Amino acid sequence: MNLVLLGPPGAGKGTQAIRISKHLGIPHISTGDMFRRATAAKTEMGEKASQYMNRGELVPDEIVIGVVNERLQEGDCASGFLLDGFPRTIAQAEALEKALARGNKKLDQVLDIEVGEEELVRRLTGRRTCRSCGKIYHLVFDPPKAPTTCDVCSGDLVQREDDGEETVRNRLRVYQEQTYKLIDYYRKRDLLSVIDGKQEVETVFTDIEELLRV
Ligand code: ADP
Ligand code: AMP
């Protein structure tokens, strides 16, 4: 299946993507994770992307589209993929459609996880991520046993640079201005399924399982 996970920052896309990817046996492609890895590796692309990310702005379309097109050519995407955090603009959505059409492919479904703004701020400011294995925690909603150590691999838990309240508010504004319109874009193409993201993690996943047209 070729899937897109849509929804504002903090809706739970990464949390659900891990479960969906395992359930369907398809790769989880997070553009945010790709940029953070490139930033940590200090590549030219990573250095450029981090300037936008740290301000809570979108990385320019031409950079993001290039990165995703390359990733979708890799062998593990042959039998499907789950895009998380891409597309975020209409131009990205159009580029994706074109890239898929070149390989005689198309999207099967777009899952939109919906959560209200104040809950998103609470989720993002309390998010902690393991530097080593990437596991996502929340200080209140899904706390680790020790506040700075990963339960799974004992790696350091860190707060993302863009999860401070001011940057979070900017990211939510950018979502409203540039990404929200994709809901309509995909609804018109009859690809959209809406999920209530305010429920518990496992309930959200059960809803997603039921909605997946497998
Ligand atoms: P996104 O990838 O959409 O930005 P994440 O999956 O990283 O969102 O989740 C953001 C934060 O919210 C994390 O700290 C995560 O543990 C927490 N979270 C995710 N889903 C839920 C949920 N259903 N209920 C409460 N907290 C959640
Ligand atoms: P995320 O991990 O999805 O929350 O993304 C973190 C940051 O990476 C975003 O705030 C953007 O700066 C950048 N980013 C990730 N995906 C995209 C995208 N599709 N288009 C533009 N910027 C992106």
Image (cartoon, rainbow, N blue to C red):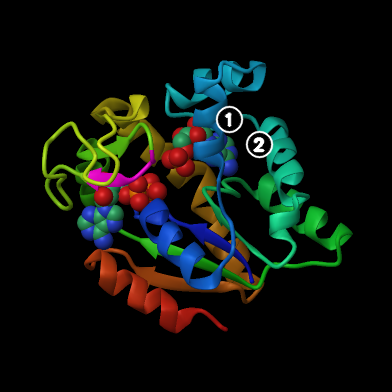
Q: Is residue 98 left or right of residue 188?
A: right
- Eyeballing the image, is 191 above or below 113? below
Residue corresponding to mark 2: 64
Residue at x 56% of width, y 83% of height:
213
Q: Say if mark 2 contacts mark 1, CB within 8 Å.
A: yes
Magenta segment range? 133-137
Question: To which quarter of the image does residue 151 belong?
Answer: top left
| Amino acid at the residue labelled 2 | Val
Query: Does mark 1 have its CB less than 8 Å from ligand 2?
Result: yes
Residue at x 79% of width, y 67% of height:
105
Residue at x 56% of width, y 46% of height:
88
Q: Nearer the viewer, residue 110 or 212?
A: 212
Q: Nearer the viewer, residue 143 or 53?
A: 143
Q: Which mark is residue 113?
A: none
Residue corresponding to mark 1: 59
| Amino acid at the residue labelled 1 | Val
Query: Does mark 2 have its CB less than 8 Å from ligand 2?
Result: yes
Q: Secondary structure at mark 2?
A: helix
Q: Quadrant of the C terminus?
A: bottom right
From mark 2 to mark 1, how far is it between C-alphas?
A: 7 Å
Q: Position of residue 208 (x, y in %)?
A: 41, 74
Instruction: Rate crowding at label 1 as few (under 14), some (14 to 19) or many (20 or more) other CA atoms within 10 Å.
Output: some
Q: Quadrant of the N terminus?
A: bottom right
